[in-house]
């Protein structure tokens, strides 16, 4: 156990579940999970906190479950994800004429260029969450990734600006604070999910990360190492469940169970002669439901979500085979059968499921490697990036906390002998480590929450 690293906690406040995961990097730079808890979420709709009391209850329940998994843990500060269909993005352009042309471009001038973008006009009631530089220009030279050290008269950049509703942000902060926690930072959920499932090669090849959650589908598009576009699509797993409930006349719990157990995103793949028997309500006869009908309902809604993805890719001119990395599907909704085939059919791009295993230490329980927890693990990675780049204050005295046995999967060891040399193979170790994502968070502004601190302090 590497006790020279802080324990960082991610809090994912979702529409269907709230998850708390505590992790620490081991000596190989992989995350060891020290605590894990989840609870059903009731106060959140479409990724937005509406009922603060219900959300507090769910956060506390998830926190209690996390402590139950490891009583030695102490959780005070958390990295929190932010999503919801109030999140919008826009593109802007900014330039400054340099006063000191005798010296090279400095970090101070770049910071000035970025801070100028916070004066961009946005609708009343919204707040700029993040300003992300895309590519820089120095005089007549374009597509510069990092202009520091260049010489020139004029420096400029294209910017991706992300905005959100002030009240929605305040509701998240209140829920976290009233649960007895401190928000270390607010992180845009599509960026957290991307960090968890994407490798450096994906960033360079160009990919679209599609995180299908309970209330929203989050999209982040990367091209030539740059975040080109983010979007929050207001349809996701809950809409599919409600469609099944309405279309087949069943209870919501039954609809969810059918979706998970028997659902398919392609009706052609569903057997025409297979039926599900649902018990009747209060003495009414049992219902026979066709698996094909179920698949038809799921396919209709999933196709609509993928049409939105295609629409957003067209908006930034990346719909036509330009993303060599294709589409990476993650989030709980990505576990639907035949979703890869439907995605490829609708978008015309290659697709695969993105799992957060890339960053997890060997020996973790399988539950944590599910795409459902991509956002939460991505939040821990954001915290580590802050720690490694000295962006925030972290406690200098790190407590000794071991990985609890309940969160460790037994490792099956296979020993092979060749020419008298024994080789040990661990069945669930993650070999072939790809290049790290150390530069991933470096592209984004280092703190989202500081913007709201002053205003919040005046009101409380």
Image (cartoon, rainbow, N blue to C red):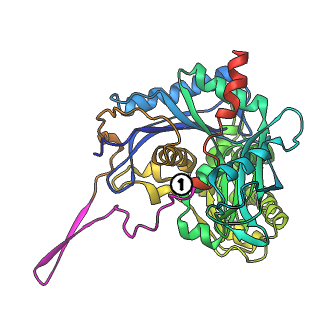
Which x, y percent locates residue 219? 71, 55
Badge 1: residue crowd in 10 Å (few <14, some 14–19, many ≥20): many
Camera sees residue 15: yes
Give the residue displayed 74% in from the left and 28% down from the top. Answer: 50
427 magenta-colored: yes
Q: Which residue is at the far top?
A: 460
Q: Which residue is at the far front?
A: 102
The residue range painted magenta reads 412-441
Which x, y percent locates residue 439? 54, 59
Corner quadrant of residue 453: top right
Q: Which residue is at the far bottom?
A: 419
> Which SS class for mark 1?
helix
Q: Is residue 68 left or right of residue 207?
A: left
Mark 1 sits on what residue? 196
Camera sees residue 248: no
Q: 174 or 271: nearer the eye?
A: 174
Q: Quadrant of the N terminus?
A: top left
Q: 388 or 187: nearer the eye?
A: 388
Give the residue displayed 56% in from the left and 62% down from the top. Answer: 198
Which x, y percent locates residue 398? 34, 34
């Amino acid at each position: 156990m590497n006790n020279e690293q802080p324990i960082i906690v991610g809090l994912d406040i979702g529409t269907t579940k709230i998850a708390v995961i505590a992790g620490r990097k081991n000596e190989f730079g992989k995350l060891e999970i020290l605590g894990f808890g989840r609870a059903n979420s009731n106060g959140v709709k479409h990724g937005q906190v509406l009922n603060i009391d219900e959300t507090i209850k769910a956060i506390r329940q998830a926190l209690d479950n996390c402590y139950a998994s490891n009583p030695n843990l102490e959780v005070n500060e958390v990295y929190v994800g932010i999503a919801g269909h109030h999140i919008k993005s826009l593109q802007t352009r900014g330039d400054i004429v340099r006063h000191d042309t005798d010296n090279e471009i400095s970090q101070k001038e770049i910071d000035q260029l970025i801070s100028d973008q916070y004066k961009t006009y946005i609708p009343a009631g919204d707040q700029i969450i993040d300003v992300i530089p895309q590519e820089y220009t120095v005089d007549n030279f374009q597509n510069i990734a990092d202009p520091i050290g260049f010489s020139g008269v004029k420096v400029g950049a294209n910017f991706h600006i992300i905005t959100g509703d002030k009240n929605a942000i305040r509701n998240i902060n209140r829920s976290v604070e009233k649960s007895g926690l401190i928000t270390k930072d607010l992180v845009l959920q599509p960026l957290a999910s991307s960090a968890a499932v994407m490798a450096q090669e994906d960033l360079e090849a160009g990919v679209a990360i599609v995180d299908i959650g309970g209330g929203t589908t989050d999209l982040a598009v990367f091209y030539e190492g740059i975040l080109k576009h983010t979007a929050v699509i207001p349809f996701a797993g809950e809409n599919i469940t409600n469609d099944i409930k309405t279309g087949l006349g069943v209870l919501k719990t039954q609809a969810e169970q059918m979706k998970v157990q028997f659902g398919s995103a392609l009706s052609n793949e569903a057997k025409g002669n297979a039926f599900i028997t649902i018990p009747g309500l209060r003495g009414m006869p049992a219902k026979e439901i066709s698996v094909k009908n179920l698949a038809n309902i799921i396919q209709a809604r999933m196709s609509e979500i993928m049409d939105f993805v295609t629409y957003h890719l067209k908006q930034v001119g990346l719909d036509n085979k330009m993303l060599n990395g294709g589409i990476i599907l993650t989030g709980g909704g990505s576990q639907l059968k035949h979703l890869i085939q439907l995605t490829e059919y609708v978008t015309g791009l290659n697709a695969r499921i993105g799992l957060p295993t890339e960053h997890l230490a060997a020996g973790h329980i399988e539950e944590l490697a599910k795409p459902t927890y991509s956002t939460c693990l991505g939040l821990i990675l954001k915290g580590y990036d802050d720690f490694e780049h000295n962006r925030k204050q972290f406690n200098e005295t790190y407590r000794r906390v071991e990985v609890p046995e309940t969160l460790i999967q037994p490792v099956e060891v296979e020993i092979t002998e060749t020419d008298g040399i024994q080789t040990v193979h661990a069945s669930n170790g993650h070999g072939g480590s790809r290049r790290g994502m150390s530069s991933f968070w470096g592209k984004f502004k280092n703190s989202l929450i500081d913007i709201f601190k002053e205003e919040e302090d005046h009101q409380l």
